[in-house]
Image (spheres, rainbow, N blue to C red):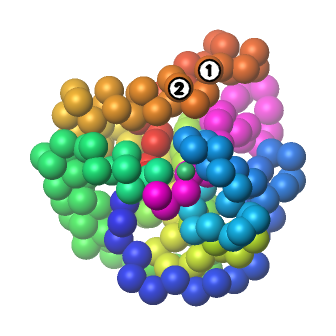
Amino acid sequence: MNFFLFEDEVEMPDELLNEDGQLFSHCKQCHQSLQDPAQPYTLEKVFKRYPNTEKPQVLFEYAICDTCAGEIRGEFSEESAANMQGYFAEKLEAREEEFSEDIHHRMQHCMLLGSPLAEEQEYAVVARGNGSKMLQSQYPFAISVTAMDEMQELISEKTRDLLDDFVGKNFPGPPEFETVPVDGKWVLV
Ligand SMILES: [Zn+2]
């Protein structure tokens, strides 16, 4: 989702550390370090609400270096890429509110629908990093499962298979995820 123009380097906020409270250290795809030396990357944390817990739980999380993200994007079908960009552009234009400068506000609202994530069962937070810094632009942003499901209608079988492959290869499913299949629809590279 290559739509950033200017990126400001700021401290990585705690919300964007991994589940162990650490910076994302390696690219999920090529396993190269993101920290030493510092590399630009995209990170994503997917959350799910369970009825028995107060706070949403991390369903899965990863970081991917710009080189690998570019390679995956390069394999998307042209039609899917155009449809997804069109969907983003249309939803962003339709938003009545200004895009908030407050990153905490952004991480609590769906960027595409403007709706509060408190009302969503699942959502993803996507951000950019460079080593230990966060790169701020349109990133970080959050997307609700409602918007993700709408976007699924717009992507081809081939692109969907590609994203499912990325997830299948990289998230073989530790025990705690066994009952919750990780879904390729959440991959926003
Ligand atoms: Zn990589």
Is residue 47 visible to us here? no
Q: In the image, is residue 84 above or below residue 174?
A: below
124 with respect to 2 (left or right): right
Image position, residue 147 (x, y; %): 37, 47
32 and 62: which is toward the camera: 32
Q: Which residue is mark 2?
A: 169
Q: In the image, is residue 90 above or below residue 147?
A: below
137 with respect to 162 (left or right): right
Q: Which residue is mark 1?
A: 172
83 with respect to 103 (left or right): left
Image position, residue 58 (x, y; %): 70, 39
The residue type indicated by label 1 comes to Pro
Q: Secondary structure at mark 1?
A: loop
Residue occupying the far left of the picture: 79
Does the beta carbon at disc 2 come under 8 Å from ligand 1?
no
Image quarter (top left, top right, bottom left or bottom right) of the N terminus: bottom left
Image position, residue 127 (x, y; %): 57, 63
Q: Quadrant of residue 24?
A: bottom right
**For the point 57% across and 37% down, which residue is it?**
121
Binning the other alpha carbons within 10 Å of mark 2 as few (below 14), some (14 to 19) or many (20 upward) gives few
**For the point 42% across and 27% down, which residue is it?**
165
40 and 139: which is toward the camera: 40
